[in-house]
Amino acid sequence: MASAELQGKYQKLAQEYSKLRAQNQVLKKGVVEEQANSAALKEQLKMKDQSLRKLQQEMDSLTFRNLQLAKRVELLQDELALSEPRGKKNKKSGESSSQLSQEQKSVFDEDLQKKIEENERLHIQFFEADEQHKHVEAELRSRLAVLETEASQHQAVVDGLTRKYMETIEKLQNDKAKLEVKSQSLEKEAKECRLRTEECQLQLKNLHEDLSGRLEESLSIINEKVPFNDTKYSQYNALNVPLHNRRHQLKMRDIAGQALAFVQDLVTALLNFHTYTEQRIQIFPVDSAIDTISPLNQKFSQYLHENASYVRPLEEGMLHLFESITEDTVTVLETTVKLKTFSEHLTSYICFLRKILPYQLKSLEEECESSLCTSALRARNVELSQDMKKLTAVFEKLQTYVALLALPSTEPDGLLRTNYSSVLTIVGAALHGFHDVMKDISKHYNQKATIEHELPTATQKLITTNDCILSSVVALTNGAGKIASFFSNNVDYFIASLSYGPKAASGFISPLSAECMLQYKKKAAAYMKSLRKPLVESVPYEEALANRRILLSSTESREGLAQQVQQSLEKISKLEQEKEHWMLEAQLAKIKLEKENQRIADKLKSSSSGQSVGLSQENAAVSNAAGQDEATAKSASEPVQSTSLIGILTRTSDSEGPDVESREDLIKSHYMARIVELTSQLQLADSKSVHFYAECRALSKRLALAEKSKEALTEETKLASQNISRLQDELTTTKRSYEDQLSMMSDHLCSMNETLSKQREEIDTLKMSSKGNSKKNKSR
């Protein structure tokens, strides 16, 4: 960047220097011309001075001559004054002398007259010469003032140029110093870059060796472990399910829905147009209610009556195409099979238009031949016939390219992928042409209807039919315009969406592969649905954020908690089994007690037969009870042990024999203490197992993170190797560019120094010349 800025500065300075040099040359020429002009003026001034001196000398001589003549005239006048009194005295004697004096006087008068004339002439010449001298002197003075101002201006320009040259010299010297400093810094940077490149080369060698070893290892693993690569061949890759783009599918379905609405409007307008055209044939030029129409119009009406069977399928085909585009499918030209049916329906409608076109043209000719038709109406009919031909041609063109777009879903070789965009643009152009044709038809039919309404034989039925036809034509025009604008707005999206397909491939190869891909996609979606389970209610976000640190520190996962729950469930089941066991034992004990009570009751009944017998039996019972008490006392004095699933119960009874309730409380408290002890042991074991499991999971997570960091480091090493190679290339290029720039700058500085020395010499010469001129002007 710095070198580019320096080059820009030097280019600007060079441009300014060339401009100043050109101005300097122009000023040199002007100074030389002014010097030549001043020399010429000097010579003219010398010549004028010489002529002035000559005239002054002549003037001096003339003044001297005039003075002499004036003195002589005065002498003559004195002599004359002296001679007059003498002449009065000597009239007689002086008649002869008077004659002589008159002759002399006449001679003197003539001489005096000549001298006076010569004096006047000299005075005139002197005055003219004086005026001319003054005029020339004024011109020369004004010229001298102009030359002095010009010389001062030239001197100011020369001074400005010298200042500029000195400033440019100082700037260039400063730039030279800065460039020298920058060159030194660049040399230091180059040395540092060399050292870095050497280090990078060493690192690159090490990385290359490491990566080559890893590459060999990974290649061996791939060759051993990967049995089949389905992305290598395009035929197999076309069967892979692409990534599901829901936004793309929703957009395509929205576009298809809009297209369906436009096609429905167009179908209704076409149905109305054909139906009202049929009604018009029955009315004009001959009303079928009054007279029979021509066989041609009868056939034409019969064909127009069948329009619904050709127009309705267009709407049905578009509806099927819209229904085939769902959120779960992949919408490209290879998978839109329903486009072929729409193309077939459009082909059948084109056949219908071709069938009715000659009858329509002949019907218009028949209208022109009727007596009611005027010249303006004939011109409109001719225009309409041309428009109908254009309409059929536009539909044929549209059907051709729609059929081409339907080929990829049936014949893979019918249309290349490179031609998809051009075909779509041509379809857009054809739709715009359809809109233009419908506008012409609307305009011409409107003119025709206005002319027919002005006819005297126009009936109300004809007027209403024409209005209906005009409304259907306007609807057709609006529908065509909407479809054309809609397609032109979305053609870029259509072209961009053609690349939607299998990853790392140009697209679906054949319709069969696309169909197989869609089947695989359905199977994959069904499998994913089967795997999908309802989500458990999650912890609130704020609570999760609050417990995040605890969760991270304890590293307890969902699986560990599930295992704890499973273990607790197993414990509960075991405890329930023990509970059932003790319930059974309690029932058995109850049954034994009932049997014993029954036996005692039977004995009591049998002994109630006689009092004696009863007394003896009572005594025996008392003795037996005493014996039993003694036996129980003996047995109570000894410890009794009972084994069960929970543990061993050891108890000692008092000498008096505890009650049933006290015994039950003791058993209950013993069992509860045993259960508490066992649950504490189980909880301790569970906590240890959970701790060990959490440690194992943390270690596994660390291992996974280490593997990820390892992969990231490998990618970073790859990027570092690429950056090293790029930096090496940039370093070599920068070295070369810096060396070239330094050489260019040194050459440029040398040339600028030479030019500056030359300019200094020229400035010195100009100063000397301007100083000499100023001195000469001052002396003048």
Image: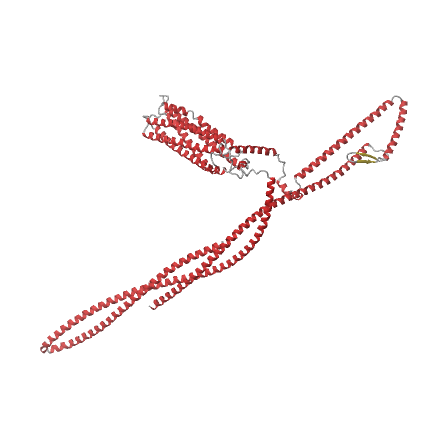
Q: Residue 387, relative to residue 780: is it above or below?
A: above
Name which quarter of the figure residue 484 lies in.
top left
Q: Position of residue 674 (x, y in %)?
A: 77, 37
Q: Quadrant of the C terminus?
A: bottom left
Q: How many marks?
A: 0
Answer yes or no: is residue 306 visible: yes
Q: Residue at x 20, y 70 (%)?
A: 119
Relative to 98, 605 lies left or right: right
- Of 101 and 671, the residue lying toward us: 671
Name which quarter of the figure residue 767 lies in.
bottom left
Relative to 433, 412 lies left or right: right
- Of 662 and 444, the residue lying toward us: 444
Answer yes or no: is residue 328 visible: no
Q: Residue 247, relative to residue 371: is it above or below?
A: below
Relative to 257, 527 lies left or right: right
- Of 389 and 126, the residue lying toward us: 389
- Of 161 and 91, the residue lying toward us: 161
Q: Position of residue 241 (x, y in %)?
A: 55, 36
Q: Position of residue 290 (x, y in %)?
A: 36, 21
Name which quarter of the figure residue 285 lies in.
top left
Q: Residue at x 76, y 30 (%)?
A: 583
Question: Which colour assignment does the render follow?
Answer: secondary structure
Q: Residue furthest left?
A: 92
Q: Position of residue 564 (x, y in %)?
A: 69, 38
